[in-house]
Amino acid sequence: MVRTGSASVAAGPTLAVVAREAGVSVPTASKVVNGREDVAPETRRRVTEALDRLGYVRRPRFDAAKASGMVDLVVHSLETSWSGAVLHGVEAAAHDAGLEVVVSAGLTRTRAGRADRGWMDKLTARGSSGVLFNLAELTPSQYGWLDQHRIPYILIDPVVEPPVGAVSVGAANWQGGVTATEHLLALGHERIAVVAGHHRKMCSGARVAGYRSALAAAGIRQRPEYVRHAAFDESIAHRRMLELLDLPEPPTAVFVCSDHMALGVYEALAERGLRVPDDMSVIGFDDLPEARWTSPPLTTVRQPLSEMAATALRLLVRMMEGDRPESTRTELSTRLVERASTAPPRG
């Protein structure tokens, strides 16, 4: 049972379950539920029968004229410049749309049970018309609750692969990994290491895959010992860089999959008396303000965080008006920002 306000509602089938039962896509099932006309009669019949058979609870569609004028933004943390960029993008787009934003932090899979229900109760009590999640890893019960109550939501840079039908906005992480590695290859580096994020995070896997693809395209042998994971943690990245330096044949360049981790890499190199980029080229990912403050300033791959957040807000407004995007995944391009931390290898 999921408690919403003073009433208790039994969890029912999600729209994704209905779509699977009817043999259609989630967007098609959504069109039938929302009364859209652009659905073939036979398809509409199958979806309608599946809705009735499974006991799907049809709730009134959000009406922009009756909406609360408020949306929720759930972020992983409020203590990072990453969150600041996301907040900036959401606030600007919300202002243009005439919406107010309620911000909360720290919703993760570890906060299960009563904590989940408490958050959902607050969402219901506020009457928010939609939710943006940034780096928040939702539980199946949370996804089910949002679908059951037909609350529009969008994932900004989802941590893991979202469920079928969930709408998300992110960056071209694979291409960013390719771009970073190709930059180092163009400078003449062949011994290129990567300090990646968490094994199971989508963005980390995509960036490492891009790194490997660029090496393969250049005919460079991939060395397993050059791939280290640091869970997007500065102190762990510091340790991983020391491990790379202790290899019999250490790299001459390192692609660090976040600017935050690059700070730890810089510290490790300084401890060993090595200079950037004379002794080691370093390239990051994100283009956070820290990238410009380091010494030397960090070459990095920029992902447009504020633009991603603003795009997500605009898509959410469309969903609140009943217009579901045709594509469930929107990717914004990344680009290289060249500064002073990369150079040709010595010799």
Image: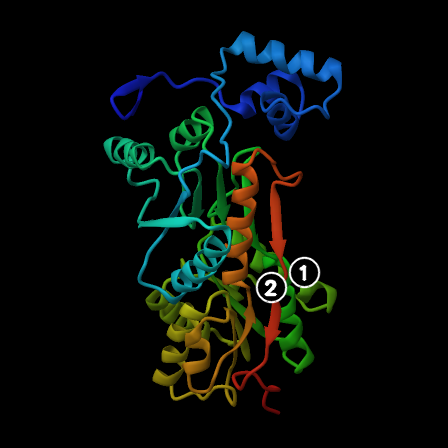
Q: Name the residue under label 2.
A: 177
Asked if one can make out residue 308 in the rendered structure from this viewpoint, the answer is: yes
Question: For this rendering, which residue is in front, 327 or 129?
Answer: 129
Q: Residue furthest front?
A: 65
Residue 314, horizontal then vertical, whole percent: 55, 49
Residue 299, horizontal then vertical, whole percent: 54, 78
* Residue plotted at (71% across, 17% down): 43
Callouts 2 and 1 close, C-beta under 8 Å: yes
The amino acid type of the residue labelled 1 equals: Ser
Q: Is 133 placed left or right of 9 in the picture?
A: right
Q: Is 116 placed left or right of 326 in the picture?
A: left
Give the numbered dot on residue 213: 1
Residue 79, horizontal then vertical, whole percent: 31, 62
Q: Where does the C terminus fall, quadrant-wise?
A: bottom right
* Residue plotted at (48% across, 23% down): 60
The amino acid type of the residue labelled 2 equals: Gly
* Residue plotted at (47% across, 28% down): 150
Question: For this rendering, which residue is in front, 107 or 67?
Answer: 67
Asked if one can make out residue 246 in the rendered structure from this viewpoint, the answer is: no
Question: For this rendering, which residue is in front, 198 or 325?
Answer: 325
Residue 63, horizontal then vertical, whole percent: 50, 32
Q: Is mark 2 on a helix, strand or loop?
A: helix
Q: Where does the N terminus fall, quadrant-wise?
A: top left
* Residue plotted at (39% across, 75% down): 263
Mark 1: few, some, or many residues within 10 Å (few <14, many ≥20)? many
Position of residue 251 relative to residue 42, above or below, is below
Give the numbered dot on residue 133: none
Q: Is mark 1 on a helix, strand or loop?
A: helix
Marks 2 and 1, Cα distance to the nearest angstrom? 9 Å
Observer-side mark, 2 or 1, equals 2
Mark 2 or mark 1, which has the lower sequence index?
A: 2
